[in-house]
Amino acid sequence: MDTSKEQRAAVQRIYNRDSDYYITSTPHARSNSLTRAFEVLRPEGGVLLDVATGAGHTAFKMAEGCRKVIASDLTRGMIASARKLAAEKKVGNALFLRVDSENLGFRDGALDYVSVRIAPHHFADVQRFLREAARVLKPGGKLMYVDNVAPEEPREAAAYNHFEKVRDPSHNRCDTVPALVEMMEAAGLRILHCETLRKKMAMDEWTNRPHLDAKAKGELRAFLGNASPAIRHWLAPREEEGRFVFDEIEAVVLAQRP
Amino acid sequence: MAIDKELLEILACPVCKKPLELSRDENFLICRESKLVYKIEDGIPVMLVDEAIPLDEWEKSQKG
């Protein structure tokens, strides 16, 4: 099995099982990055492909500005959840598709917009996804890319990625902002906007995932308790109103195919 | 559920990126270049190489 195939299998195993969790998951359904992604992209008509749509939150937000959105995911279960949410929200301009982020089944220059939000850290090869996104965009078409990012120091980045992987075995890697920018430019995209947002996570809610056992929860709590100064600075673990919270940092990047 | 016509216009084979042919019963998308057939499940095209059917197998199943 190649790495991409193994990674796709891990994602499908977990997301077919837990798909409905993402309909109500706070960071996916209600985080600032959802609003910011829409404000920064400002879609006006046109067709948008949302890659690794999950329960479809990003696709359905973008549907407010687009003529048509295509909510796509690798996993059958996630598409079923996205369809359910589209029906609940009465989204009338969404289509659904199962596709692999690294082999987008679209013609060259077919789309006005591509979006991806809180998902590339599951991809086996982000660079390949970015090349595919650039290929399927029309000249002038735009990519809205949102994902959690890692600290720039390699050892701290590895520790942070381990922390995420304990919680979700299908986590592959969060990249640093400079690495993302470099990969986008290597894919032939031009960066129009880049910002980072702090996203507060309540530890009990973050670890309240289906099938995460007490040992793993203990390991995650201990990681934050014993974290290096750099990780403490990055994740800012703290008590707030009797709850243990920390921050994830999301990059919101808008890039354009020249 | 029928496939959206505009979507059909922009879809391509994920391997060769060439246009696809819709089967007569509208349940499959055929790529003669890559010799692969992609299913349409309940109106949802499955554009995954891992789940595609080899063209010769699909042709046999259609005759049978």
Image (cartoon, rainbow, N blue to C red):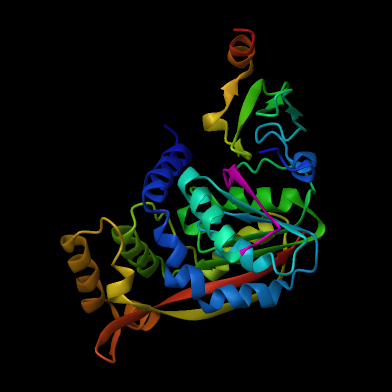
In the image shown, does B32 or A21 lie closer to the viewer? A21
Quick check: A108 above or below A239?
above
Res. A225 visible in picture: yes
Residue A101 % position (x, y): 58, 47
Q: Quadrant of residue A164?
A: bottom left
Q: Judge left or right: residue A168 versus residue A242.
A: right
Quick check: B13 above or below A102?
above
Residue at (80, 64) in percent of width and height: A45
Q: Judge left or right: residue A150 versus residue A166.
A: right
Res. A151 visible in picture: no
Residue A84 % position (x, y): 52, 55
Q: Is residue A91 magenta?
A: yes
Quick check: B58 above or below A225?
above
Q: Quadrant of residue A143?
A: bottom right
Q: Quarter of the image containing the N terminus of chain A?
A: top left
Residue at (32, 82) in percent of width and height: A245
